[in-house]
Image (spheres, grey):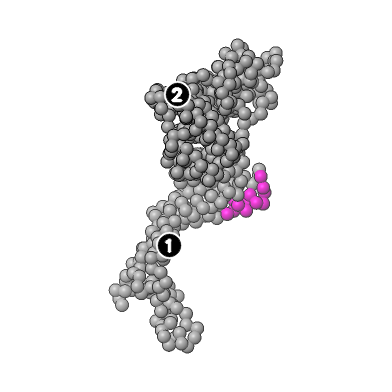
């Protein structure tokens, strides 16, 4: 498979009829587009090359950002033997063969850069197999992954490597890539200025995808340049990068949750749309909205939870796409509702106190006494029935005898919780008055 600027294996100078991506492979690190923060003179990789010594590293970034090209050029820059393998197609036998080859090269005085594409696809045991060879210096490991190394790679392997974060190619970098493609073809793309902007946007930061689209455009003969609609009809649209069980999933739900918490309905709607357009399951989004209603709004607006559950019912009743409007309504309601995490904090405080106090008995006066024995030992004795008391409030103690009353729930002065707080203050004052009179 061809990467952003070339294949994994070292090749001769491409012929004139080679694929466009092959002809645009950079021949040095300073020709790599969009990763100057790493490959430039002040970047981590640039400094390593200047020193002539490489450390093992993980190249983490979106598809089509030049991870494979950087690995190949690193080997060239410091004079190392380049050995590429792919975790998709390789197993234990391939790894053993690569390590044996590296040991043979080491005996001749030649160091090996072992490039492992899609390294996250190796299981934990296979990843452990790299450790002795990395530690002994038999290989300098350069792994490439589109997934968050924190989740996908062993801690032991991460501790022996540096993680280099590659950036999604921005519009300027993608525009430069198109300029190089036109220079290589010695002609302009057969598209209008607006279509060129649309083409760059459709790549979604993926240079490989952009070059493949450009190659398709160069392969056709047109009388007039294509405008955006005509180009869209000819070319496929790239789906947004989004894996529902990977980091992109958690990044977007985090962005949605924090936008809701920050009372920004515009941003919240955008992040939710990003998830649903990319194919996220609507019921998952609804589950997160329900959780938000309890965690970040609570009793500041009791209708928030009702709105979310109603949206869930409406979506299940209508299905897509009609039912998605109910999800939008719930999202906007949450973003514009008064916020309080008092219920969430109360839950954590109550759980903590329950674990600390163990199996203490409730006070005897609030225990039911269905048998004579239970009555004889004091169950239910002295219980004050609140409805018989003045103001419907007895002011009795409901805590274990060994635990002083605690203030676990502390409502905020926002939304409906302002009213709740007034009630709590009223009852506290009434309780003090009853005790004083007693």
Q: Is residue 290 visible?
A: yes
Q: Is mark 1 on a helix, strand or loop?
A: helix
Outermost residue to the top: 186
Using the rendered view, name the quadrant where residue 36 is placed. top left
Q: Name the residue under label 2.
A: 78
Indicate the position of residue 123 as horizontal and vertical percent values. 55, 44
The segment highlighted magenta reads 309-320
Indicate the position of residue 157 as horizontal and vertical percent values. 46, 41
- Residue 104, above or below 172: below
- Residue 189, above or below 136: above
Residue at 41%, 56% in the rendered image: 345
Q: Name the residue under label 1.
A: 351
Crowd rating for badge 1 (residues with CA inside 10 Å; few <14, some 14–19, many 20+): few
Which of the pair 274/220 is nearer the observer? 220
The quadrant the N terminus occupies is top right
The quadrant the C terminus occupies is bottom left
Q: Is residue 196 visible?
A: no
- Residue 261, above or below 74: below
């Amino acid at each position: 498979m061809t990467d952003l600027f070339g294949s994994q294996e070292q090749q001769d100078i491409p012929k004139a009829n080679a694929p466009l991506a092959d002809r645009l492979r950079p021949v040095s690190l300073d020709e790599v587009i969009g990763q100057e923060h790493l490959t430039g003179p002040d970047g981590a990789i640039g400094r390593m090359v200047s020193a002539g010594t490489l450390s093992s590293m993980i190249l983490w970034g979106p598809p089509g950002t030049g991870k494979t090209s950087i690995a190949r050029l690193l080997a060239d820059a410091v004079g190392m033997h380049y050995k590429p393998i792919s975790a998709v197609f390789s197993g234990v036998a391939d790894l053993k063969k690569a390590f044996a080859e590296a040991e043979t090269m080491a005996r001749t005085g030649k160091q090996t850069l072992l490039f492992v594409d899609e390294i996250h696809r190796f299981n934990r045991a296979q990843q452990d197999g790299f450790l002795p060879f990395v530690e002994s210096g038999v290989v300098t490991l350069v792994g490439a992954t589109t997934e968050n190394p924190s989740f996908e790679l062993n801690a032991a392997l991460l501790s022996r490597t540096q993680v280099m974060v590659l950036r999604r190619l921005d519009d300027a970098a993608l525009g430069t890539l198109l300029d190089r493609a036109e220079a290589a073809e010695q002609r302009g793309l057969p598209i209008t200025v607006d279509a060129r902007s649309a083409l760059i946007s459709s790549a979604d930061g993926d240079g490989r995808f952009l070059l493949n689209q450009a190659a398709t455009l160069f392969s056709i003969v047109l009388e007039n340049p294509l405008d955006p609609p005509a180009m869209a009809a000819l070319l496929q649209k790239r789906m947004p990068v989004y894996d529902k069980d990977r980091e992109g999933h958690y990044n977007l739900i985090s962005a949605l949750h924090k936008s809701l918490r920050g009372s920004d309905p515009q941003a919240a709607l955008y992040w939710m749309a990003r998830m649903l357009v990319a194919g996220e399951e609507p019921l998952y989004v609804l589950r997160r909205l329900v959780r938000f209603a309890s965690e970040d709004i609570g009793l500041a607006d009791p209708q928030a939870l009702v709105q979310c559950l109603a949206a869930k019912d409406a979506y299940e009743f209508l299905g897509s796409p009609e039912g998605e409007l109910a999800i939008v309504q719930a999202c906007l309601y949450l973003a514009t509702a008064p916020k309080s995490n008092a219920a969430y904090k109360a839950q954590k405080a109550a759980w903590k106190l329950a674990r600390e106090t163990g199996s203490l008995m409730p006070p005897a006066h609030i225990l039911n006494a269905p048998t004579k024995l239970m009555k004889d030992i004091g169950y239910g004795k002295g219980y004050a029935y609140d409805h018989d008391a003045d103001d419907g409030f007895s002011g009795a103690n409901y805590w274990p005898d060994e635990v002083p009353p605690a203030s676990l729930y502390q409502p905020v002065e926002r939304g409906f919780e302002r009213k709740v707080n007034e009630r709590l203050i009223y009852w506290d004052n009434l309780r003090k008055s009853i005790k004083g009179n007693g």
